[in-house]
Amino acid sequence: TPLPTDSAAVRSAIGGLQAREAQLEYANQRVEVAEQDLLPLRQNIATKQAAYDAEHQQDVAWQRHFEADEAKLQAMQSKKSQIAAKLDQLRVLGRREAANMPGMRWQAVQAEKAEAEAEDSSARYRRLQGQAEQQLKQTMRAEKDDA
């Protein structure tokens, strides 16, 4: 506290120190509030990270299904081409046996059906994967905007 006998410089210095003391007290109050808010913020971050991890795991699972469907599709196309080659070979060689042809045609039809199913399933997983990626991007953008 400045005394009446203090010079103007001393009074000015004391006033500056009192202002600095008030600033430090305010800063300490802000630190206390921030420390109180830190634990809920960390819990919120952990919750959101768990949600991101779950979405990522779902995306990875869909990717695996997609890859499995692609492998099935390739196998079906390979089988179809093998059957078609056998049929062509039988036609060229003139060895059409009445008993074998219906069986070959049935196999070709089954291969085409399986190929169509694999393509449908693959398209479905591609679509789901795209939706999951969009949702993850939107969530991440929203979190960045919130931060």
Image (cartoon, rainbow, N blue to C red):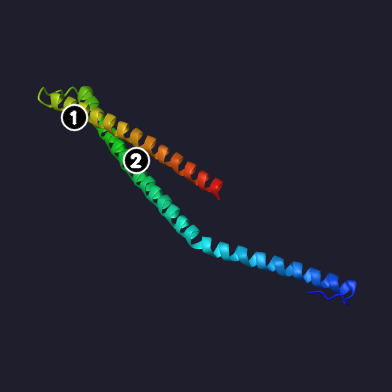
Residue 74: image x %, image y %?
A: 31, 37
Q: Is residue 27 left or right of residue 1?
A: left
* Mark with earlier residue (1, 2): 2
Q: Is residue 106 left or right of residue 24?
A: left
Residue 77: image x %, image y %?
A: 29, 33
Q: Nearer the viewer, residue 37 or 96?
A: 37
Q: Nearer the viewer, residue 107 or 101?
A: 107
Q: Nearer the viewer, residue 105 or 5?
A: 5
State the image quarter where residue 100 is shown: top left
| In front: label 1 or label 2 | 2
Most extreme residue toward the front is 4
Residue 69: image x %, image y %?
A: 31, 39
The residue singled out by tag 1 in the image is: 107
Label 2 crowd (10 A; few <14 / some 14-19 / many >=20): many
- Element type at mark 2: helix
- Element type at mark 1: helix
Q: Is residue 95 left or right of residue 139?
A: left
Quadrant where the N terminus lies?
bottom right
Which residue does the image show at 52% across and 63% down from the upper left? 36
Which residue does the image show at 17% across and 26% down from the upper left? 106
Q: Amino acid at mark 2?
A: Phe
Q: Nearer the viewer, residue 11 or 123?
A: 11
Label 1 crowd (10 A; few <14 / some 14-19 / many >=20): some
The residue singled out by tag 2 in the image is: 66
Q: How many marks?
A: 2
Q: Amino acid at mark 1?
A: Gln
Which residue does the image show at 38% across and 45% down from the upper left? 59
